[in-house]
Image (cartoon, helix red, strand yellow):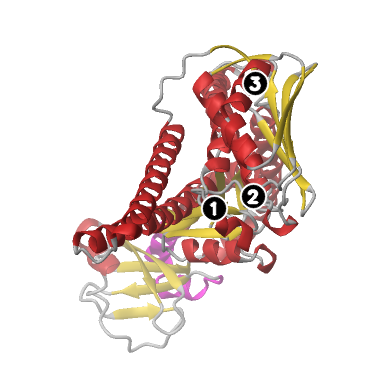
Amino acid sequence: MTAKIFRYIFLMGGLVLLLCAGLFFGLQYAQAREDTYAALREEASFAVAGVQQTGEDYLRSLNGETAVTWIASDGSVLFDSTSQAGLPSQSDCPEVADAFAEGEGQAIRADSANGAKTVFCAVLCPDGTVLRLSRPLSPIWSVFLEISPVFWVIVLVLLLAGLFAFRAARQITKPINSISLDTVEATEVYPELSPLITRIREQNLTINDQIDELKRKQKEILVLTDNMSEGFVLTDANGIVLSANTISTQIIPGCEAGADLTAPEHGDISEIVRTALGGERVDIQNENGERCHQIIATPVTSKGKISGAVILIVDVTETVQRERLRREFSANVSHELKTPLTSISGFAELIMQDLVPPDKAREFAGDIYRESHRLISLINDIIKLSKLDEQTILTDKETLDLYDLAGETLSSLQSVAESKQVSLRLLGDHAQIEGVEQFISEMFYNLCDNAIKYNKAGGSVTVEVRNEPDAAVVTVSDTGVGIPYEYQNRVFERFYRVDNARSKEIPGTGLGLSIVKHAALLHGAHISLNSVPDRGTEITVRFPAKQEL
């Protein structure tokens, strides 16, 4: 800005000086021309007097730079100081014609050969002849030489103008350059800058308000995204992370602000980001170890161009597992229901067609009864699981004594245990929790029933109830066949039964431990299993000391 102000001031000063110099030179040139006319008129008056006295002899006696021509009344040349006689008639020359008509005439003509200008002055003599005097007009450069000192004055003035222009520019811009945008109120400026200072102050207030609003919104967005259970990532057009919440950094290692998600080390994510930045929306499921995530990448456009991508990462592990369990459950239910129904249908068809001997009819009826009972048990277990899954049962909480409930369960299974030659024992102390009696009783029944069914003749089942500082603990242990280690993680799955000959011989739906698991989850309890093949199994359930449903 300083250079621009300096240039404008200097050019303005130079232009004024040039105009003044041109005007001065023009006036000087005009003055030189008028001086030449005056000198010629004065010489002409003397020449007229001399011609009247001595005639042509006077004209011949003249010396100097002035040329003299004596012209008769008819325009013929009587004498010319620069040429021989015989010049053409001069009556057509303007200055001569004016002299004949008005007594005096003057003119300026340029030489066609060299362009030099000549001043002519013609005077009418008393005898009717005309004397014409001429003198070359000094060229403009000669005038310039005459006033050459003025040129150096102009140069000096231009230098001074440049210096003053520089200082003026500095004085104008210095207050502007010294304005501090942060402390504009404390800046001292000349009055002409006061409106600018006022506008800057108002603009600062507006900008500060906008910055505060942006910070508030940014903070709200950061709080919102950090508290999301989904991962949220925003990248620019090159795949550089602009923002990423905490969950996304846990799901995608190295997904911090400034990271390049298109880099090969990010694996499948890099391909997803590149696809989104290419303008295509991506919606896929990606499995990473035991977790499954749905990744949705959407391109962000601005003014028709892709300026980045938004990536949303949703943990759908539970949904996928539920869908898989639902399919498995449907397949297993179909299979488990079909088996007893097929047996019942076959036995009934044989009886209906009188293909069963009378002595076998009672046996077939017993088979039908057992299969029907198995079918009813299966349906009841499925209904219980469905209600536990959907939590449609009214779960009014009440204070329960685990020791008493365990005792009631063992009493109800006493006859079954005696038929299997298994002894039952209850140890420990009374422990109370808040829970649903129906679910706790069902849990104890299934645990004890399995311990009896998979036990050995002469074996035992022990139920121990303990009070611990932060939990009420129930342990059901047996001396049965045990569970191989490779199957222990699956025994709580629906319809899963250990694949061995003993398990196939023992009736059951494969839903007992699954019901135990869901009832424990409903009460916030934790289940642990410890089993050694041919030595027995121990299942421990830890209930919180106080449980609110």
Residue at the image position 71 percent from the left and 14 percent from the top = 431
Q: Nearer the viewer, residue 150 or 214?
A: 214
From the image, tell me which residue sits under label 2.
251
Q: Name the residue type under label 3.
A: Gly
The magenta stretch spans residue 40: yes
| Number of the front mark, 2 or 1 | 1
Disc 2 vs disc 1: Cβ atoms closer than 8 Å? yes
Q: Which residues are magenta?
A: 38-64
From the image, tell me which residue sits under label 3.
407
Place of residue 161 in the rendered image (x, y in percent of width and height, measured from the top left): 66, 42
Place of residue 413 in the rendered image (x, y in percent of width and height, measured from the top left): 59, 31
Within 10 angstroms of label 3, few (less than 14), some, or many (20 or more) residues? some
Task: Please state if 184 lies on the left or on the right of 23 as rendered.
Answer: right
Picture quarter with the N terminus: top right
Magenta span dominant secondary structure: helix
Disc 3 vs disc 1: Cβ atoms closer than 8 Å? no
**First of labels 3, 1 by sequence position:** 1
Q: Nearer the viewer, residue 385 or 350?
A: 350
From the image, tell me which residue sits under label 1.
293
Place of residue 222 in the rendered image (x, y in percent of width and height, measured from the top left): 59, 33
